[in-house]
Amino acid sequence: MARKKTVLLMTVGTGMDDGKSLSHGIFYSIEHHNPDKIIFFGSDASKNTITHIEDDINEDYGGYEFVQVDNIDEFKDFFAAIKEKILEFNEDKVIIDYTSGTKTMTAAAAFASMVYHKNLVVVGGNRENGLIKSGTEKIISQNLYPIYDDLMMEKVRELFNSNRFEAGKAILEDIVEAENKDVYVQLFDIYYNFDNINYEKAFELFPNEFLKELLQTFPDLKSQIPQNRQALQTMADKKHKFRCHYILASLLNNAKRRAGEGKYDDAIARLYRSFELIAQIRLKEKYKINTSNVDLEILEKRGLDKEYLDNLESIKSDGKIKIGLAKDYDLLYHLDDDLGSFYNENKGMAKNYISFRNESVLAHGLKYQTFENYDKFEELVINAAAILTPDLDRLLNQTKFPNI
């Protein structure tokens, strides 16, 4: 594998003596780092500083490049110039030296080193009249990574709390020295899968040992995080008696998160599925009816009239009677179920709200959905869910995502 080139980026000022004293420190850094390429950044006046060591640079290092930035007080101009060279040589070993230069130059150099994780150095030593005495020079490395990492970790927490798990993980990959980085990465993986309804994968990533690590990292969440894990365990267990009730609560929270992000079409689609699931759960649990293959014999035994059963028979396809949301609730009404009565009492409202989903670009239409549409539909679905699951509030709390 080829050796990486060393590229030395250096800010250059003018000094009080035409740059002669500054040039000594600049050349000390060059000799120390022995770069393959030297790039100076400064104004037109800074070029004079380089003339004092130009012959040595040309002879020993094959010359240099000078990037001129005329507006010496414009931070963004210097930062842009340094950034361009960092990106040009990003695959090489880039060292940034801010020994010389104006406050604006050196600030831009330091900031660029922090943002792009490049080595930052300065020539130090004993000073006399503000200048470093010859023979006392030393290279001082400045590690700004922890500062950058702290700033990025604040952003990571914001992204978690706004459910942007992939973006958060991308930032975590660029963080170098953050404490508990691995814990954050696994946390993002868990809630990414949780949010995408892959409960089995989320629970697989959530062993008891990791729960202990999380609680050590986030002691303020000692109530919420264990509840989330318990909910995931239930939803991952296909034989659990209350699995579908937890999934329903999780879907409702999922819809609320999408609405909170302004994704009302997504939120309404999840409400629609929740509303349908409510009826499916009741039909399955109480009447042993599978809505993907309705058993007419069960309904006959329950005394449903022949005309209604004939209507169901008429929609049979490929040997199966499959019914959707409206027919689910209509069947519950014919079974004299309280959820069927609730739907029948609110049928006009329900059909109107269901049309929000049907007219959405995510279903059959092209209409943009609004918060008002979501809010109305959510109230109807929550009321239906509370009839199905009397302890709905507890399940909603168990499946609610924490804020870190």
Image (tube, helix red, strand yellow):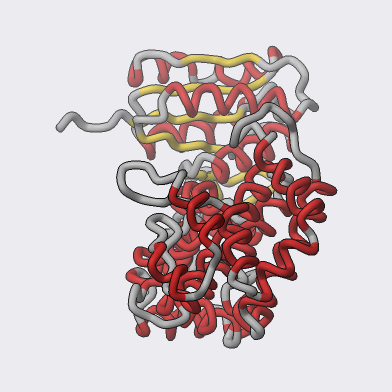
Q: Write down the quadrant of residue 392 in the picture.
A: bottom right
Give the image location of residue 316, x and y in percent.
40, 46
Give the image location of residue 376, x and y in percent.
81, 55
Q: Please give the name of the residue rendered at 61% of the width and 66% of the height, measured from the top-left corner.
A: 334
Give the image location of residue 100, x and y in percent.
63, 34
In-front residue for pair 148/390: 390
| Outermost residue toward the left in this view | 1
Q: Please give the name of the residue rendered at 44% of the width and 50% of the height, measured from the top-left corner.
A: 313
Q: Please give the name of the residue rendered at 63% of the width and 45% of the height, measured from the top-left corner.
A: 266
Left or right of 256? Residue 213 is: left
170 up-or-down from 17: above or below: below
In-front residue for pair 367/108: 367
Left or right of 360? Residue 135 is: left
Give the image location of residue 257, x and y in percent.
66, 57
Q: Is residue 152 visible?
A: no
280 up-or-down from 313: above or below: below
Q: Is residue 178 visible?
A: yes
In-front residue for pair 104/365: 365
Q: Quadrant of the C terminus?
A: bottom right
Q: How many marks?
A: 0
Q: Please give the name of the residue rendered at 63% of the width and 15% of the height, measured from the top-left corner.
A: 48
Q: Write down the quadrant of residue 290 in the picture.
A: bottom left
186 up-or-down from 233: above or below: above
